[in-house]
Image (cartoon, grey):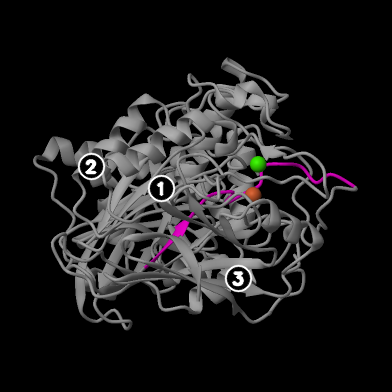
Amino acid sequence: MTAAPVPPVATERAIRAIVGAGHPAHELDLAMTPPPAPSDALTRRRLLGAAAAILASAGLGPLGCAAAPGGRFRDDPFTLGVASGDPWSDGVVLWTRLAPDPLAGGGMPAVPVPVRWEVAEDAAMRRLAAAGETVARPEDAHAVHVEVGGLRPGRPYHYRFTAGGAASEIARTRTAPAAEASVATLRFASCGCQSYESGFYTALRRLAEEELDFVVHTGDYIYEGARRPGRRWPAVRPHPDHDCVTLEQYRLRYALYKADPDLRAAHAAHPFLCVFDDHEVANDWGGDGAPGGARGAAFLARRAAAFRAYWEHMPLRRAQRPAGAALRLYRRLAFGRLVSLNLCDTRQYRTPPPCAGKIAERCAADSDPRARMLGRDQSRWLADGLARSHARWNVIAQQVPMMAFDRGTGSGPARHNMDAWDGYRAARGRLLRFLAAAEIANPVVLAGDLHRAAAAALAGGAPDPAAPALATEFVNTSISSGGDGRAITRTTRNWLARNPHVGFIGGLRGYCRFTVTSDAWQTDFRVLDRVTVAGAPARTGASFAVEAGRPGAVGA
Ligand code: FE
Ligand code: CA
């Protein structure tokens, strides 16, 4: 089969016109916005000409594999599921990507395809709250991002997509409470680090079963590496045997991950707030390079491909659409007056880490006052937003642990992960001192990356047991990375002894579940005993509570 020629660019109107005609009557009945009529006969002829070109190429090209003539799919185009994300009080982002043959480049012809979306108040999709049509374009890998507005605050909604006669599953999402609402209780989760190779996504299935307002994903949504024989983690489900460097390779990796039924279920159950960490691009990358790899233009080309594939597969707003190698990831979401949530980016604007970002003994460079973790613009944005916040709890959700964390073994010297905030001590100290000086209400830091769960008190940048806690940090363990863990080992016992400000370290897989009220923040570390076999139940491995006004976690 030969590749279809790329047709002339058609306007959205033209595409609506064609597919409107091909839709069954019951779908047209659902339409709340009729396809707009072209303004004059000449425009109409030109649009119909473009439409005919699309249909002709579709009939001759690879669409034939996936869809019957007339733009109707033969195979399910919703193999990667649907997702929602970044809820505001009046709306949410809806995402899907048409991919009838996900592991063969998607299986779509190189033509734009209209996609209808519907949001309803009920699971049967009878009481429609909003609906419309968008276009899945080949240059976006046929992914669509719909920013729905006009919804009511703080309530659940159901949504689905239809395209070419096929309908997606009906999924659930939820809008954020109104900006000034006094929210009694907010329940959400954080998760990350989902190496497909290392285990099944049972933790994501259990996450889907929780009653939550939303989920924060702290990154390592994919792992970009090739399968390496003899690597430390067991390969339960091997990756294709290459490193992701090109856009096509990153897209293929996302397709592999996103087709997983447990991951699909988690997205279909809750809106996600996503940030990337390192493995969405390259291991331990920061700024314009990765340790031991290329820096500068060659890396930025790879970063641009990685960002593009990330955007294509996440429920992100237009503001997060990348321009080349730049993607504005940092943003703020409000949940009434209870929680202000700052999603931060500790990768894109950081200076190179000391000791090549390795776990190493301390060096002068880890306290370099010129070293930056957030970069100047993001730091200003964060400080400004925190200073203006009236929220009861101010969350900084980001990638790498902020706590000082001595990972030394036995009676050996102190060792720190220079890829995390321990490699950027001056920057961390400035941020924590700002939280204290500006009297930011109840700061809570969320992180991932560690592949272990942790609860810690953050104090002025130094792991001094006598220093007063300025903030509280909760680190989510991995969904699957590292394979089956162990709850407690000699190593973690040793770490707890070395780090008195760390109240908990757990080595099993799972996620964090947070229940937040005006008076207290409770964290339940949800854990699974196995992820290398499917179907394990989740249980609460440990719980910690933070009383409003008293930073530092207390075992519950
Ligand atoms: Fe990870
Ligand atoms: Ca890493």
SS of the residue under disc 1: helix
Query: Which secondary structure lies at badge 3?
Result: helix
- Res 182 quadrant in image: bottom left
Extreme-front residue of the structure: 466
Question: What amino acid is labelled 3 in the image?
Answer: Ala
Residue type at numbered disc 2: Ala
What residue is rendered at 80% in x and 46% in y?
227
- Label 2 CA crowd tier, 10 Å (few <14, some 14–19, many 20+): some
Mark 2 or 3: the one toward you: 2
Q: Residue furthest right?
A: 230
Q: From this viewpoint, which residue is outermost toward the top? A: 297
Magenta segment range? 214-229
Q: In the picture provided, is 117 more to the left or to the right than 7? A: left
SS assignment at label 2: helix
Q: Nearer the viewer, residue 28 or 461?
A: 461
Marks 2 and 3 sit apart, C-alpha to C-alpha, by: 36 Å
Q: Mark 1 highlights which residue?
A: 55
